[in-house]
Amino acid sequence: MSIKLTMKEPFSKSKFLSVRFRGYFDLIRPFTLVAPLFVSMFIMFASLVYNDRFADFPNWWITVGQASLTLVFLNAASNALNQATDAEADMISKPYRPIPRGIVKPEEAQSIAYIFYLFALLRAVTINVWFGIFVFLIMIFTVTYSLPPRMKRFLFINQLWIAVPRGLLGILASWSVFGDPMQKEPLVIGTIAFLFFTGAMTTKDIVDSEADKRTGTRTLINTFGTKKAALISLPFMFLPFALVPLLVHYSILSYYFLPLTIFTITSLIVFYLLIKESENKLLENVYAWSFMYVEYLFFAIGFTFLIIFGEMGRLTFLS
């Protein structure tokens, strides 16, 4: 029997992949690791170009690979810990996951999470001090999101508790590999990412609405309903990109970042998909959630290419 590729039916037997291995594989939720991997790589390269550190890092691609994989392990640890502590809710809304199916025990998932956290932290401090600090801060946010005081339970705060590490701290950590994270570019772009995630993370709560309510977690979706939650989230997704021309006007961002305003359109698409509540048949959430991750990836790609072409143009002008 060939293995099914959907996350909702992940444990069909296959001569190439055991049920237990597939359980561990799904525990780290691979799809959610794609965006952090490539976003971090692109932001690191943008920092390398902007700060002209090629001479200091002749083997820069090795550093990029090591640092980005560190962030992937950090995200994988967070995913495993979240599933371990959400076992009760997952029995209701996501019974296909490895813990509700009995493939992986919650204690195993927590052990895997702690091993990944330790590996990520130890690896991070070998990159540089700033990177180690940001990885530690991200770890604090993700651990306290799932474990006591379990910030996931609290309305509005749960949105911020994801947006800070995934948006702001993730960008600053990536930039710090080759540059100063206190430069205005990473601070502004990180703030834009933070605001975007503050709204966009509403997309993940649709399928968990009833389970969250029954297990004591308040979200925008199960408190206000999908449409009101989408309207509350829209300004956070739309305005950060709509305000880019204003940031350029006041010289907070360079003129070559103006094309980032195009992400107002993609944010409106996320908003539309959020209201539609269309369930993704391949992945484990709605289409708005999937599209949100794609938008974030292309935002990082766009930022990096604008840095490259903008700096090339500036240097040509100066010469």
Image: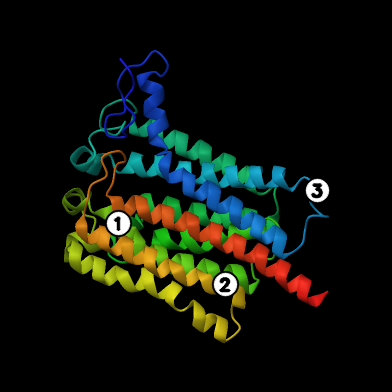
Quickly name the residue at label 1: 203
Other residues around mark 3 within 10 Å, as few (<14) / some (14–19) / many (≥20): few
Q: Quadrant of the C terminus?
A: bottom right
The CA distance from mark 1 to mark 3 is: 41 Å
Q: Which quarter of the figure is the N terminus placed in? A: top left
Asked if disc 1 and disc 2 are in contact, CB closer than 8 Å, the reply is: no
Question: Is residue 133 visible in this depiction of the protein?
Answer: no
Residue denoted by label 2: 257
Residue 186: percent from left, percent from top: 60, 67
Instruction: Tell me if residue 197 comes above or below residue 57 in the rendering.
Output: below
Q: Which residue is mark 3?
A: 58
Q: Secondary structure at mark 2?
A: helix
Q: Amino acid at mark 2?
A: Phe
Tell how many labels.
3
- Residue located 54% across and 68% down the image: 189
Q: Classify mark 1: residues with Cα within 10 Å, few (<14), some (14-19) or many (20+).
A: many
In the image, taking residue 187 as reference, residue 4 lies left or right, namely left
Percent coordinates x, y for residue 287 in the rendering:
29, 50
Which one is in front, 24 or 235?
A: 235
Residue under the point 30% across and 56% down: 203
- Which structural element holds mark 3? loop
Image coordinates of residue 133 in percent, x first then y, are 61, 57
Q: Is residue 248 left or right of residue 82?
A: right
